[in-house]
Amino acid sequence: MFDLSTRDIKFLQGVGPQRAAILNKELHIYSFRDLLYYFPYKYVDRSRLYYISEINGNMPYIQLRGKVLSFETFGEGRQRRLVAHFSDGTGVVDLVWFQGLKFVMGKYNTTEEYVVFGKPTVFNGRINIAHPDIDPAEELTLSAMGMQPYYNTTEKMKRSNLTSQMIQKLMKHLFVALEKEEIAETMSENLIRKYSLVSLPEALHQIHFPQNADMLRKAQYRLKFEELFYIQLNILRYTKERRSRFRGLMFEHVGEKFNTFYSQYLPFALTGAQKRVIKEMRRDMGSGRQMNRLLQGDVGSGKTLVALMTMLIALDNGFQACMMAPTEILATQHHETICKFLNGMDVRVELLTGSVKGKRREKILKDLLTGDVHILIGTHAVIEDTVNFSSLGLVVVDEQHRFGVAQRAKLWAKNTCPPHVLVMTATPIPRTLAMTLYGDLDVSVIDELPPGRKPIQTVHQFDNRRASMYAFIRKQIQEGRQAYIVYPLIQESEKMDIKNLEEGYLHICEEFPEYKVSKVHGKMKPAEKDAEMQRFLANKTQIMVATTVIEVGVNVPNASVMVIENAERFGLSQLHQLRGRVGRGADQSYCILVTGYKLSEDTRKRIQIMVDTNDGFEIAEADLKLRGPGDLEGTQQSGVAFDLKIADIAKDGQLLQYVREIAERMLEEDPQGIKPEYAVVWQQLKEMRKRNVNWSVIS
Ligand code: ADP
Ligand code: MG
């Protein structure tokens, strides 16, 4: 059979080895198939011709039909430009070129009729079209014009004349080559019929050469449908396989430890959301299936307590539990919090991080093996091979986006039967994205904050108005509160970051001579960082100047002011995370976003969203829309590449949900993957798994 994916692109007419090398490098196009699946990023409707008498400088792209009256050049050297006076009998416009003058002069003349396509602007009172697309009118019949596709290209490509137009030309050659062969359908007949999809060959043709807007929509729908369908099918299938392979540990009872804690040690009433989530997890862990749950809860919603109570259930069933945090500071803080909660109960909790060494470490490792340590809290150190448990029953991963998928997978092997897994995150991941990213994790949400919290007030402040800001901070400190001042961390230049931070620190020390100031950044040794955090926590210092190392989880309830310098450099989710460091006590808290005066439209929007809402989910949705999923925090670290060719997680959420249900129904109908009517689908899934290694790590 004709296999498009093994046909080297260099053999396509019009390509050759040189262009092939560029296509390989710039767009990762290696085969005929790769090119076929390189879709336009936009279309312009070229089905209409305008008269020059109708157009003005405010119009978008338009096209005209007429002749060049004369050519004229102006200026010298770099200023040189070529103008073609172009007319259709109803008026005259100037076509203008700043580059490639010779080429244009050589190519076009004053006798032939042309169709000109471009964006009109007004210059010196005349209508100009700079660097228009020009085609001889004879070659370009109206019916063939239709919707004009535009392909993304890079600077390098343009230098080798691999423009959007050139790609379109190659696409024509590709379809000529395909005429002799058949593109194999990748969806099953019954699904195509039931969901009124156009066929694959039709969709691929229309996506590159749309006949009209309606056909284009149908083609896009079919291709998005298919793309999302296979992603979902893959995840669902994978989940099923894992479930059938691994039985879960059975936690049948809620026993003495849980009940004692609940009735005698719990310092406050659980929120409704906390209760509901704990119930969901009890059900999971008692079901005989391995629990894989993602717990989402905004900063300060009380996830730690939920984790602790879930761990107590494991203990009540004779198992150990372990909790991983992404940083030493956080692990230490969890350890302290949990020890405090459990103070007086017969539960042994240990902390294991990189800085726990020698005899102390040996003892912990030994006591883990005998089961004397009940709860282990730590950093990555807990998943090292040297750490073994007598019977690990539950793993809690806090702030999961700092952990790679591979690291999570390592946990599976810590017990013959894989432990239950609870992943907690304060980065509220929109549901659509969670479904794609963590398709096999069940999702629980804590959507309620503990009572008595006052919403944080957020203001935007230009950086030339610091005096009033410092006065405000001073007043807060006088009232007994503390303040954070955060500087951005730009990975390209760690030195610069530290410089910013150092300067900021000195400046703050000068500004507040009467108070003590802490400083924390990523280049410090964990022990130093820790010591400094502890000083701040104990209110021995009143101001904490830091980079984003304090972003995740750190809890200092007395801190009531969060100043974020250069707020324009942060993403929305990150701003929200940082803001969540305050507002943890009973006092009114404030977040001050400091930016320069000149802001881009996008930045202005981002800052406004922060000022307008405290709702993490709203912010996450907005973030997804503004930045697109590839940039969403956590997606890169978690090892998932978003290699979507046509669907858009931010915009196609509903379709995603819809096809997921379709995939689920199909799996119910054909759980073994043997029904002939779905043979095409199973075959396609197999091929896609082969092709896309990334899929295997989505878990
Ligand atoms: P996060 O979800 O951000 O990890 P934490 O677990 O750190 O939140 O909880 C934030 C604060 O709220 C902690 O000081 C915790 O003790 C407190 N807290 C948790 N649950 C409740 C509750 N039900 N009522 C009152 N305070 C609570
Ligand atoms: Mg937390």
Image (cartoon, rainbow, N blue to C red):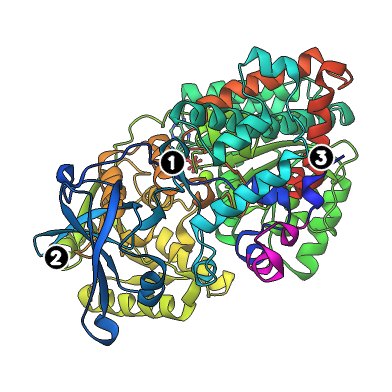
Please say whether residue 373 is visible from this viewpoint. no
Which numbered marker is on residue 141?
1
- Place of residue 458 in the rendered image (x, y in percent of width and height, measured from the top left): 25, 47
Please say whether residue 241 is visible from this viewpoint. yes
In the rendered view, would you say 538 is above or below 103? above
Secondary structure state at the residue bearing disc 2: loop
Examine the structure image and report whether residue 453 is included in the region drawn in magenta. Answer: no
Please, what is the three-letter code of the amino acid marked with disc 2?
Answer: Arg
Q: Main secondary structure of the magenta part?
A: helix
Q: CA distance from mark 2 to mark 3?
A: 60 Å
Instruction: Say which of 255 and 424 sits in front.
Output: 424
Question: Start and end of the magenta stretch?
Answer: 8-22
Tag 3: Cα neighbours inside 10 Å, few (<14), some, or many (≥20)? few
Left/right of residue 338 with respect to residue 134 in the rendered view: right
Q: Mark 3 vs mark 1: which is more N-terminal?
A: 1
Q: Are marks 3 and 1 in contact (CB under 8 Å)?
A: no
Please, what is the three-letter code of the amino acid marked with disc 1?
Answer: Thr
Instruction: Say which of 86 and 485 sits in front.
Output: 86
Tag 1: Cα neighbours inside 10 Å, few (<14), some, or many (≥20)? few
Which numbered marker is on residue 465?
2
Seen at 38% across and 37% down, the residue is 47
Give the residue number, with chain letter if any, for mark 3.
687
